[in-house]
Amino acid sequence: MDQRRDDDSFSPASKLDGVSQRQTEQIESQSRPNAALIHETIRAEGEQELERRWWAIVLSGFAAGLSIALSLIVQGEFHALISDEGTRRLVAPLGYTVGFLVVVLGRQQLFTENTLTPILPLLHNRDLGTLGSVIRLWALVLASNIAGTWAVGSVLATTSIFEPRIVEAFVEISQHTVKGDFTSTLVRAIFAGWLIALMAWLLPATKGSRAHIIVIMTYVVALGGFAHIVAGSVECAFLVQSGRASLAQYASDFFAPTLLGNILGGTTLVALLNYGQVASEIDDHRE
């Protein structure tokens, strides 16, 4: 079916009779896209991601793993330079948003975005072929993200490019990744997965305000101390490679509960629920 006709059928102005073409264009320019149009926009993006070559996914995912380190670096700089505890608590999380701004606006592959984007084609197609493609994408993105975080974590842990007080800030910020028990980390990860997937859902509707949405949503992740599998991997890998945590702690205290929680938060609270609200409309349109 023609994509333009698909978009028009989901447009609020297309439902109005007796409206001129010029008036229709003015209405559409002022209207928010409805849920079905957002769904179809993200689903089309997901279809494209599932068709990408494996090496392009790996390179993009590795770049995201490197770029997300800016979240720890800038947050650490703020943390070290602000002496007042209350001000630091409010301002330092702004540094956390920088890595996500680079990754998302730079269109690099981030695992938690992929708990939403390729899931919509899977819910739409409901076949084993799409499921296999989603599993392939998840595996490639996660592995390359983690490889990137360990590479940059090694640089932070084994070089002296930052002042000692900045390094101590990195340590203080990163300790939360291995402090909680499995259940508490899982719950914190569900919140992070929900917020990042929700951010991905909101972006198609924001037009020129994408940066604001990224900053707001990721600021909340940092402010709440929620667990993100990629940004948190930079922090935990830094602890392991600087001798402040063990590999077993990385695997059991951080990686396993955080990965599970991010998947649950992204796929269940965003992908499934938001698909559910438009499923009947999408199915009617397919018929």
Image: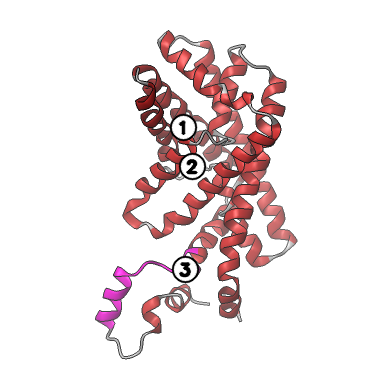
Q: List x then y, in percent, for residue 235.
A: 55, 24
Tag 2 and tag 3, C-beta contact below 8 Å: no
Image x and y of residue 59, in percent: 54, 37
Q: Residue furthest front?
A: 86
Q: Which residue is mark 3?
A: 37
Q: Tag 2: residue type? A: Gln
Q: Depth check: give the residue in front, 141 or 37.
A: 37
**Residue at position x 52%, y 17% from top?**
171
Lower sequence index among marks 2 and 1: 1
Dot 1 surroundings within 10 Å: few (below 14), some, or many (20 or more)?
Answer: many
Q: Residues within 10 Å of mark 2 (few under 14, many from 20)?
A: many
Please report contact status of discs 1 and 3: CB closer than 8 Å, yes or no.
Answer: no
Question: Label 2, on which residue?
Answer: 108
Question: Which amino acid, by three-letter code, is at mark 1?
Answer: Ser
Q: Secondary structure at mark 2?
A: loop
Q: Main secondary structure of the magenta part?
A: helix
Whole-Å distance between the Cαs marked 2 and 1?
9 Å
Q: Is residue 56 visible?
A: no
Percent of width and height locating residue 189 = 60, 39
Q: In terms of sequence position, does the residue under pointer 1 or pointer 3 come before the other?
A: 3
- The label number, if any, that marks residue 88 in the structure image: none
**Residue that badge 1 annotates:** 67
Q: Tell me: residue 205, above or below residue 264.
A: below
Relative height, residue 170 to residue 214 (above, below):
above
Q: Who is closer to the viewer here, 62 or 156? A: 156
Q: Is residue 68 above or below residue 207?
A: above
Name the N-terminal-most of marks 2 and 3.
3
Quarter of the figure with residue 139: top right
Q: Which residue is drawn at the image coordinates 58% and 64% (left, top)?
A: 275
Q: Mark 2 and mark 3: span between their CA atoms?
A: 23 Å
